[in-house]
Image: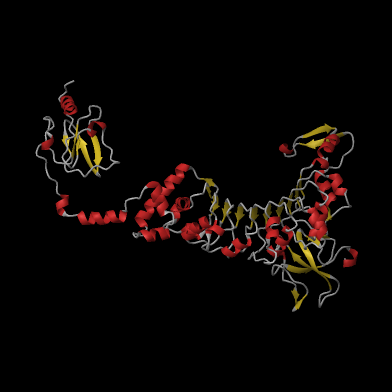
Amino acid sequence: MSAGTLPGLAVGRRLVHSGYIGTIRYVGPVNGTQGTWLGVEWDDPKRGKHDGVKDGRRYFTCLIPGSGSFIRPSSAVSLGTSFLKALIAKYVEIPHGPGMETVILGSSRGVIEVEAVRLDKIRGNLSRVERLREVSLDNERVATVDDPDEIRKACPGVRGLDLSKSLLPSWDVVALIVDQLPNLERLTLNWNRLEMPMDITQFRHAFARLKELQISATLISWQDARMLLHFMPGLQLLETGYNRIDSLSTDAARENDDARKENSELSVINFDGNELSDWTATCEALRVFSGLRRLVLSSNHLTVIDEIADPQSTPFKALRHLALASNLLKSWTDIDRVQRWCPALESLVVTGNPLLENSETGPHARQFIIARVPTLIALDAATITPKERTDCELFYMSWIAKHGPVDEDAKVREHPRWEELCEKYGRPYSLAREEQEKRRHDTLENRLIRAPKFVSPLIRPRPSDLISPCVVLPRNHRTPVQEVTLGGAKCRARCGYHIVLEGAPIHANTHVPRAARKIIQNSAGAAGFDEDMAENASRRSLGDR
């Protein structure tokens, strides 16, 4: 079949061949062969064989190397259909005529057949496209627009439209469809290859009401996307993932006060699956979007979060959610800097970064991130409760005290929240200093035990007979054996009185049985001996009730 026998075969036209979607980049002869060939750039690079070069001669170019090939015009080539034809084919079932119909129950796997009447009436009720609010024509080969106002008459109430994997050739054709849907708010155009608009007036009018736009995997550049945004003043969400964007550099002349005003409504931008690597350049390019509250930078090439020169001038003052999953972040300093770039951050996603794979700190990554970013209420899609925050911050402080630098200035440099946490919870005792004290006092003399002047389970001792500091424990008739910990030393009471020898000074957190609290003698020798309680304890030890 020649190109002339298949109308519409022209450069820029979209087609389907053997289930693969592509764009015609060349129509004509190829050296060494006869007849007409179509040079096609395929949406799926795996279908291609080269990038438009055959026997040393270039016939066309491809956005993705290796995604092109030549095919012959044939009946296997489809150029798609119009919007309304695709809509009716999907949502309207053709009447079968009056009379009885046989219906196979799906749950019976073809075993049960029933007869039904008046199914055409039911089909008619279900196929009223004017009632449609959400329309999905994903992979339905939509290529052209219908006659003027035909779409408006057929489905005026559509609010959401999905035209992904279509055969639409340009933004001008998209604008002709959108302009006939006065209530449209959400438009999805993923997996398309669209030429930039030529009729700017038509485009501006068509997209003035749009609130959400998805153009992922369209290979659109950021410069072209920014140009489109100028004509979408009400846009609130933009998804432009998997477009091989490696930089957000724009024409500085465009980024003026008028541009900031035009894009003030945009609050969500998704750059998932691109190739961004410069954090500072990315942030500065997004400064124009003053109302940005959610930013997705997952699966990019970010290796470091740069220090911000002036936290007061951050472009992300309103940002609440940041996704940095599956990047190349390796340092905990990056997390500290995120907090300075995003002072109001509430939700953070960081899974899949090398930082979390560190053998020493990786197991405690969640605790560390929660402690380092005080404004977070969710981490990796898991809510942070007040109790979890307290536990994480206390754990973080204890880890710093044990593994962090001894010098206070070094602690503050490595852990910016150290002073703030010490003010909140109190400064923890340095475990490193404690180890030094233990080694200094770990002598034979300090390990010796001195015996008391008097020990008897039956006779009540006098305070002067006790070696200070010490504890006298009365027998508890319900608990034959009691154990109390004083300064890390454990002692047991079985009957009568048991004198604790040379116990260390009692810490505020030390648990002491209620019966023993009143007979603790402090290191200054002050009498804390309760004679009545001791007498009662002595009687109980002899069985006197």
Q: Nearer the viewer, residue 70 or 149?
A: 149
Q: Position of residue 161 (x, y in %)?
A: 76, 49
Q: Position of residue 402 (x, y in %)?
A: 35, 55
Coloration mode: secondary structure
How many numbered marks does the figure carry? 0
Residue lying furthest bottom in this view? 56
* Quarter of the image that includes the N terminus: bottom right
Is residue 407 rendered to the left or right of residue 231? left
Asked whether residue 473 is in view, the answer is: yes
Image point (41%, 47%), residue name: 424
Q: Nearer the viewer, residue 363 or 210?
A: 210
Image point (70%, 69%), residue name: 66
Q: Position of residue 432 (x, y in %)?
A: 30, 56
Residue lying furthest top in this view? 545
Note whether 91 is above or below 333 in the view shown. Answer: above
Note whether 499 is above or below 323 in the view shown. Answer: above
Q: Position of residue 322 (x, y in %)?
A: 57, 54
Asked whether residue 2 is in view, the answer is: no
Image point (17%, 55%), residue name: 443
* Quarter of the image that includes the C terminus: top left
Note whether 387 is above or below 245 in the view shown. Answer: above
